Amino acid sequence: MDTTRSPFAGVGPARLAAMAEREKRRFESSRPKTRAALASGASDYLDSVPMHWMKDWPMPFPLLVAKAKGARLTDLDGYGIDDFCLGDTGSMFGHSPKPVARAIRAQARNGLTYMLPTEDALAAGRLLTERFGDFKWQIATTATDANRFALRVARAVTGRTKVLVFNGCYHGTVEDTMVERRNGITVARPGLTGQVADLSELAACAEFNDLESVEQELKTGSVAAILTEPVMTNSCMVLPESGFHEGLRELATRYGALLIIDETHTISSGLGGYTAVHGLDPDIFVVGKCVAGGMPTAIWGLRPNVATKYLRYNAGRPSGHSGMGTTLSANPMQFACLRATLSEVMTEANYAHMEKGAERLASGLSAVISRHGAPWHSVRVGARVEFICAPCPLKNGAEAALAHVPQVEATLHTALLNRGCLIAPFHNMMLVSPATKKRQIAGLVAAFDEILTELFSPE
């Protein structure tokens, strides 16, 4: 038995290195068309990719996608790939759901953008309230924008400066939230590009599942809003402990802060998101990514009492730029896709299919982990599943950071892709869509088993 396993989540370094090198060579040799296309056509982009995080994929070079349908991609070299990443939730309901594709075709004949609403906009507003609850809605293009605008409103109506976020969180590229908790102190995260402001003047950082640390920050009287996901998902996934969300709601009310729930990933939890499934009561609700079937769209809503306060504030401010809104947001194509998604795609039947498939996937991964004695576990939130290279559930962002094992995860991701399965690049996240088939789930579990057999077999 290899006695040097512990640094790599129970995997021997030599064995891991051998697999990593072999899987890298296998990927490179199997995609000559992709390599040639990138060599001839990628140099016009900064660092050879149109978006920097496309280099975060662990494979030696990016895939070039030729087409996508349902829960399956086809790359330039003709390989069919079962897609469990699904655009990191953007395509959670599958690639180009038919109602959304029909809506796009119909709206394209009537114009793409004109800074005015449509009948689809009116219908979408009603559907948003039916699906997510009693809020007064606004439309953005990304969840980053929606969170940024929500924070401006929170500061406007409370007259306070700071946002409270949780260690290890991610709410898009909202600068104010790029902080961490270090030795009980809020500091800027290392590695931020071009960072010049002192983010501790704009944000306070607490630990998830630690209401004492939350109250410690709220007592200062400087916190305008608590911004949180119901489940931490942009780290190794962390579930809320019993009573945590009820405690957040009570503390926010007691100390006069607004509670913002960001459901951009936890929309996987079920119809209406985690908020509806678990009865949360936010002051401001945010969701993006898949809400319009993959068309870039986000929504944010204010409870009526918060909306009234904001409108009163807005009526009294000097005219001029508000720092909110973008020209292409709330365009007619977004509303067409939003209406189609809410009415025909984001349905009880589709969520039931997703839940059933995700439970099958989580059970299969857990059985493989157990069979090989790996010090890992799996976790599921609705249609979202993750395997975590740590032996037990995580409590907070600090534990999640320690459970992230890049060398092991990168090797597994490439090995899974070489076996026809794509999972999200940033962590070990997988989604089951309404289009995902039983055989695709079985294929992913079998590939995971094959890889762990090599990594954990006795010497």
Image (tube, helix red, strand yellow):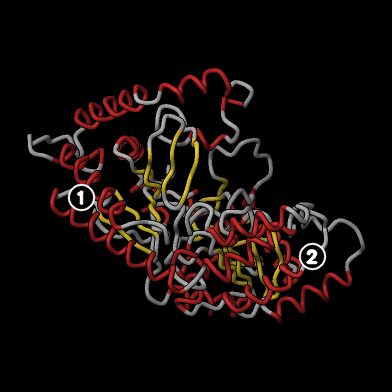
What residue appears at the point 47 percent right and 55 percent down from the top-left corner? 94
Identify which amino acid the numbered label 2 is placed on.
Pro
Near-viewer residue (95 or 222): 95
Identify which amino acid the numbered label 1 is placed on.
Pro
Residue 9 percent coordinates (x, y):
25, 43
Q: In this view, does 394 lie to the left or right of 110?
A: left
Give the numbered dot on residue 214.
none
Residue 76 percent coordinates (x, y):
46, 31
What residue appears at the point 71 percent right and 60 percent down from the top-left corner? 149
Quarter placement of the C terminus: top left
Q: Is residue 287 left or right of residue 83?
A: right
> Looking at the image, do the residues carrying marks 1 and 2 touch, with CB atoms under 8 Å apart?
no
Give the numbered dot on residue 375.
1
What residue appears at the point 52 percent right and 36 percent down from the top-left corner? 54
Residue 267 percent coordinates (x, y):
49, 65
Secondary structure under badge 2?
loop
| Mark 2 crowdedness (10 Å alpha carbons): few <14, some 14-19, many ≥20 | few
Q: Decide: is 108 above or below 416.
A: below
Q: Residue furthest right?
A: 319
Near-viewer residue (355 or 273): 355
Q: Decide: is 237 above or below 11.
A: below
The image quarter containing residue 209 is bottom left
Q: Is residue 179 left or right of residue 442?
A: right
Q: From this viewpoint, is residue 213 visible?
A: yes
Secondary structure under badge 1?
loop
According to the image, label 2 marks what residue? 117
| Mark 1 crowdedness (10 Å alpha carbons): few <14, some 14-19, many ≥20 | some
What residue appears at the point 38 percent right and 52 percent down from the top-left corner? 430
